[in-house]
Amino acid sequence: MRRVAQTIRLRPERREEYLELHRRVWPGVEAALRAANIRNYSIFLRGDTLFGYFEYHGEDFASDLAAIGADPQTRQWWQLTDPCQEPWPDTGAGGNWSDLTEIWHLSEEPPA
């Protein structure tokens, strides 16, 4: 399992629009994420900064991300959400979102 954390800025003038979209994420978008082996996906907000976290349970991360990007309903979703976001200058593998480096993790079980 691979943990992924990312961040992006939220345009203040589009804040309510973005929050409203995420109150009712489209079932097809959620299905595309699940089909691409994405689990435990959360988006958090602090001020105008969004923080996303998900766990990847597949074998081919690049291929699964490409499948999400090829999904027609997800592409329509991005047409609505992308204008609400303002990328940092250093975007990463997640498209407009910048990848964060994991520096510490408390595992579920203590080492044997």
Image (cartoon, rainbow, N blue to C red):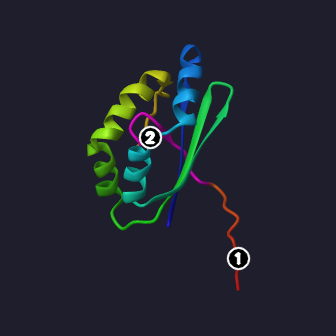
Instruction: Please rate how many residues cluster around mark 1, counting C-alpha atoms within 10 Å: few if below 14, some from 14 to 19, many from 20.
Output: few
Secondary structure at numbered mark 1: loop
Tell me which corner region of the image, top left, top right, bottom left or bottom right, holds residue 94.
top left
Give x and y (percent) for residue 54: 53, 53
Of circles 2 and 1, the one toward us is 2
User: Looking at the rendering, in which quadrant would you find the C terminus?
Assistant: bottom right
Q: Residue furthest bottom?
A: 112
Residue drawn 44% across the image and 28% down it: 81
The residue to which callout 2 is attached is 26
Tell me where residue 85 appears, x and y as whole percent: 49, 25
Q: Is residue 108 above or below residue 41?
A: below
Of the residues shown, which amino acid type is indicated by label 2?
A: Trp
Q: Earlier in the sequence, mark 2 or mark 1?
A: 2
Q: x%, y% of residue 55?
A: 52, 58
- Secondary-structure class at tag 2: loop
Residue topped by disc 1: 109
Residues packed near mark 2 inside 10 Å, few (<14), some (14 to 19) or many (20 plus):
few
Magenta residues, start to end: 93-102
Residue 58 visible, this orientation? yes
- For the residue marked with disc 1, what is the amino acid? Glu
Query: What is the quadrant of residue 16 in the picture?
Result: top right
Magenta span contains residue 39 = no
From this view, report whether residue 50 is shown above or below residue 17: below
Image point 73% across, 77% down: which residue?
110
